[in-house]
């Protein structure tokens, strides 16, 4: 009899490999999850399998705003129809759009880039949904672009790149970005130079 | 027994989000390349959050561990804000960090490479030709790590090179004199280098950086020199760096 992982049935080995492909899941956790799936009753496991299948078969990304949609074949998703396209908030990921949407602050539409420029990971502007954004701007309905990329090095680089190409090609579109500075609940003592510099530059008068 | 905290200074090159609110980051320091985990660093109220960013020169305290070292305190020494304000400079800085990462030695003293990187990053935003600063950085880094390019003599016969066009081979990391080149018939492995390009490399090798400005160099000449060095780097580390294509923007 062989010992170790190779002695496991092929189906279990496949499941372990599949789980370890998920972010944050290492081989040990993948094994633990696989044994949990084995111990679960059939109905529960099939529910999970069905949910995974449905997500991949029925959902896709909107060709206009690149947000998740169930109308993956149509040009505009329901979300694009509902929202005004005069003001577009550009975000890195779907989760960022959902966070802003849940706050109820932004009334316009979104554009999801699906990442940020990261040369260290070989990600350039061509790998983001920038072309789709340009197509939207070509329609001439947009008056303002709000750059809501993360205040990280990659997010800032993405914002600068978009600022450059939009200001060069679309002179009538107003470009804004989310304010930078001190976050609520932070201690001034522990703030970094970048945050402090931004906070000073973007200081406001007290009315 | 609890392991005592250790202190380290270095530049953060990469950051990745981990779990709900943790960040894993890579630091290049005098002691080599190390990975750390900053627990809770993604939370806005975290004392670590703003300091743990790529391209930050930081001082940190950490608890050594068998897996990932966990940081308890981080303080920025220099954030290179001038670089972070310009898209092209960010790309160039990322290239230099990846290059330094790939040529850092594990057990040797890396303090001089770290100082070279910090000094280049400190000066690049004031430079009239940033690509020239990168060329000097690449050249000096290779030299420091023992892969210096032989510029003054033929790599085959050791004879001093005359003032004329010569062929450069990235495989051997130097030039061939005309006689050796013709006898070896190495045309397919070598690149022809003009007298002007050789002059740039010689001036850098002599550390006469001020003379470089008086040479009125064009971007194209610098770019051609950088291609030679980049081919050598690719041959040394065995792969093309991901950031190379962005560094010329």
Image: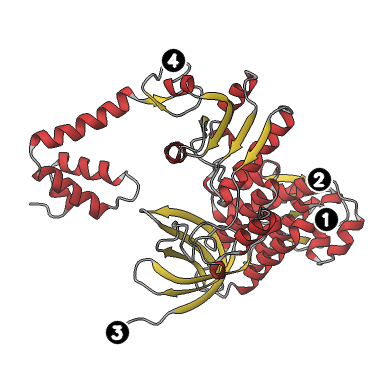
Q: Do labels 2 and 4 share a chain?
A: no
Q: Is the residue marked by circle 4 packed among few (<14), some (14-19), or many (20+) residues within 10 Å?
A: few
At label 1, counting other C-alpha atoms closer than 10 Å, the crowd grade (few under 14, some 14-19, many 20 or more) is many
Query: Looking at the image, is mark 2 or mark 3 earlier in the sequence?
Result: 3
Q: Mark 4 points at which residue?
A: A74
Residue A38 spot, x, y in % from top left: 11, 43
Q: Is A49 displayed left or right of A150 in the figure?
A: left
Residue under label 1: B200
Q: Which residue lies furthest to the bottom in this view?
A: B1
Q: CA separation, marks 4 and 1?
A: 57 Å
Of A123 and A128, which appears nearest the observer? A128
Determine the chain carrying the residue at label 2.
B
Q: Describe the element under mark 4 as helix, strand or loop.
A: loop
Total number of numbered discs in the rendering: 4
Residue visible at 55% across and 51% down? A152
Quarter of the figure with residue B12: bottom right
CA separation, marks 1 and 3?
57 Å
Residue where numbered disc 2 is placed = B219
Look at the numbered discs 4 and 3 and tell me whether their residues touch, using CB distance below 8 Å.
no
Q: Residue B1 carries which label?
A: 3
Q: Distance between the residues labelled 2 and 3?
A: 59 Å
Compare residues B36 and B78 and report the one nearer the observer.
B78
Q: Which of marks 4 and 3 is in front?
A: 4
In the rendered structure, the residue with mark 3 lies on which chain? B
Name the chain under label 4: A
In depth, the one of B89 and B75 nearer the eye is B75
Q: Specify whether B37 is left or right of B164.
A: left
Q: Position of residue B102 (x, y in %)?
A: 55, 58
Marks 2 and 4, how far apart in space? 47 Å
């Amino acid at each position: 009899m062989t010992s170790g992982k190779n002695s496991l049935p092929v189906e279990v080995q496949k499941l372990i490999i599949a789980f370890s492909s998920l972010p944050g899941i290492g081989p040990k956790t993948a094994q633990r999850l696989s044994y949990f799936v084995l111990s679960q009753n059939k109905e529960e496991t099939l529910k999970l399998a069905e949910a995974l299948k449905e997500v991949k078969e029925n959902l896709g990304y909107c060709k206009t705003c690149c947000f998740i949609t169930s109308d993956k074949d149509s040009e505009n998703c329901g979300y694009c129809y509902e929202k005004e396209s005069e003001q577009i908030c550009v975000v890195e990921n779907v989760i960022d759009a959902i966070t802003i949407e849940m706050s109820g602050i932004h009334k316009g539409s979104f554009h999801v880039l699906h990442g940020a420029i990261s040369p260290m990971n070989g990600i350039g502007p061509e790998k983001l949904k920038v072309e789709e954004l340009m197509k939207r701007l070509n329609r001439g309905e947009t008056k303002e672009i709000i750059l809501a990329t993360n205040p990280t090095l990659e997010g800032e680089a993405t914002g600068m790149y978009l600022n450059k190409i939009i200001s060069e090609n679309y002179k009538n579109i107003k470009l804004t970005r989310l304010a930078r500075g001190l976050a609520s609940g932070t201690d001034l003592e522990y703030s970094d130079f970048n945050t402090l510099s931004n906070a000073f530059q973007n200081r406001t008068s007290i009315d | 027994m609890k392991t005592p905290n250790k202190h380290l200074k270095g530049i953060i090159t990469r950051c990745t989000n981990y779990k709900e609110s943790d960040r894993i980051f890579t630091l290049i320091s005098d002691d080599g390349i190390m990975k750390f985990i900053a627990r809770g660093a993604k939370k806005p109220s975290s004392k670590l959050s703003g300091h743990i960013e790529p391209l930050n020169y930081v001082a940190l305290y950490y608890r050594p561990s068998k897996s990932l070292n966990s940081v308890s305190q981080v303080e920025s020494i220099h954030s290179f804000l001038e670089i972070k304000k310009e898209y092209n400079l960010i790309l160039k800085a990322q290239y230099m960090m990846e290059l330094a990462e790939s040529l850092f030695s594990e057990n040797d003293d890396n303090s001089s490479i770290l100082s070279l990187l910090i000094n280049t990053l400190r000066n690049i935003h004031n430079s009239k030709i940033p690509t020239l600063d990168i060329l000097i950085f690449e050249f000096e880094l290779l030299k420091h790590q023992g892969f210096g390019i032989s510029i003054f003599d033929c790599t085959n016969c050791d004879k001093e090179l005359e003032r004329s066009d010569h062929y450069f081979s990235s495989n051997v990391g130097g030039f061939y004199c005309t006689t050796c080149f013709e006898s070896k018939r190495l045309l397919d492995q070598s690149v022809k280098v003009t007298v002007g390009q050789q002059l740039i490399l010689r001036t850098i090798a002599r550390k006469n950086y001020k003379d470089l400005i008086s040479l009125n160099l064009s971007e194209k000449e610098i770019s051609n020199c950088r291609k030679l060095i980049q081919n050598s780097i690719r041959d040394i580390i065995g792969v093309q760096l991901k950031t190379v294509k962005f560094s010329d923007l």
